[in-house]
Amino acid sequence: MTKPRPSIATKRRIFRQLHESGCFVIPNPWDVGSALFLQSLGFKALATTSSGFAWSRGYADNAISRDMALTHLRQMVEATDLPLNADFESGFAADAAGVAESVRLAVETGVAGLSIEDSTGDATRPLFEIGEAVERMRAARSAIDQAGGDTLLVGRAECFLVGRPDLDETISRLKAYSEAGADCLYAPGLRTPAQIAAVVAAIAPKPFNLLVGSASELTVQQIAALGVRRVSVGGALARSAWGGFIRAAKSLAEHGKFDGFADATSGNQLNALFRDGRSQV
């Protein structure tokens, strides 16, 4: 017998509760199959990855359209029983009014949370000026509130990712986004315990999302001890999958060898996973 699916409201309520205490890992699948596998491992929530999804469609990161992103979000929400946080880039809009419209459409897909970043995609002006970035965050907050207010808003300061690794500026931006209505704060690129602890303290009591996108000596337990509320991995899982695929394909193309298949998961295991996973949908 197929078990009842949790409602969107239930997913959103569970997602907010996860942010109230403790620390949880929110891994980033890039398609339905990877989402179902992560669900099978017992994770409590998932987050999309704009880069992982873009690569799966043959695009560079930040090159997909809003319609593509919205379709992807809807498919991912419908695929699993877990709350889903959307990597919604900079809102797919040039101004605050456009951000509000994009966020309204994203909320309609059923996501439990979504992030808005302050990067522009323009190398000559990599970040929105703080006033403009705050206006965009307020527009996102307003759109969520008008839709019922139960979708979690994440404010992202991209300083470290765009070549401005200034901790003071990062903290200043995160505080401004918090005041503008962000429920959770996120500053990808932080690496040292001192940086992480400083940001956590500065934005308290709001929860902080730490990105661990490469091999790290820090464990989840150590990260939790720094006060981090949730840990995401961005495109790291997608890049890991691509790494295995590229190594196997190159061995075949360049050396005529099949040794790259040595660590491949069996078809029977995958069939069993998706037969069981899909039976729950």
Image (spheres, rainbow, N blue to C red):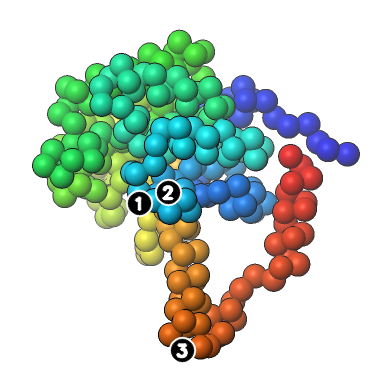
Q: Position of residue 210 (x, y in %)?
A: 37, 46
Among all residues in the image, which is located at the extreme top? 146
Residue 210 vs residue 125: left or right? right
Residue located beneath label 3 in the image: 255
Is 272 on the left or on the right of 200, as rendered?
right
Question: In the image, is 170 to the left or to the right of 78?
Answer: left
Residue closer to the observer: 30 or 169: 30
Residue most toward the right? 1
- Residue 226, position in %: x, y? 36, 47
Residue at disc 1, secondary structure: loop
| Comes first in the chain, label 1 or label 3 | 1
Q: Residue 109 appears in which quarter of the rendering?
A: top right
**Of the residues under marks 1 and 2, which one precedes in the sequence?**
2
Q: Position of residue 108 (x, y in %)?
A: 53, 22
Q: Residue at the location (73% across, 49% down)? A: 277
Do the residues bearing badges 1 and 2 touch, measured as CB atoms within 8 Å? yes
- Name the residue tied to disc 1: 60
* Circle 3/circle 2 CB separation < 8 Å: no
Q: Residues within 10 Å of mark 3 (few under 14, many from 20)?
A: few
Q: Position of residue 13 (x, y in %)?
A: 58, 25
Residue shown at 64% from the left, 49% from the top: 36
Of the image marks 3 and 2, the number of the one nearer the N terminus? 2
Query: Cα distance, mark 3 to mark 2?
Result: 30 Å
Res 170 seen here = no
How packed is label 2: few (under 14 Cα within 10 Å), some, or many (20 or more)?
some
Residue type highlighted by circle 1: Ala
Q: As drawn, is 27 to the left or to the right of 127?
A: right
Amino acid marked by disc 2: Ala
- Whether residue 65 appears in this view of the structure is yes
**Quarter holding residue 130:** top left
* Res. 54 mark: 2
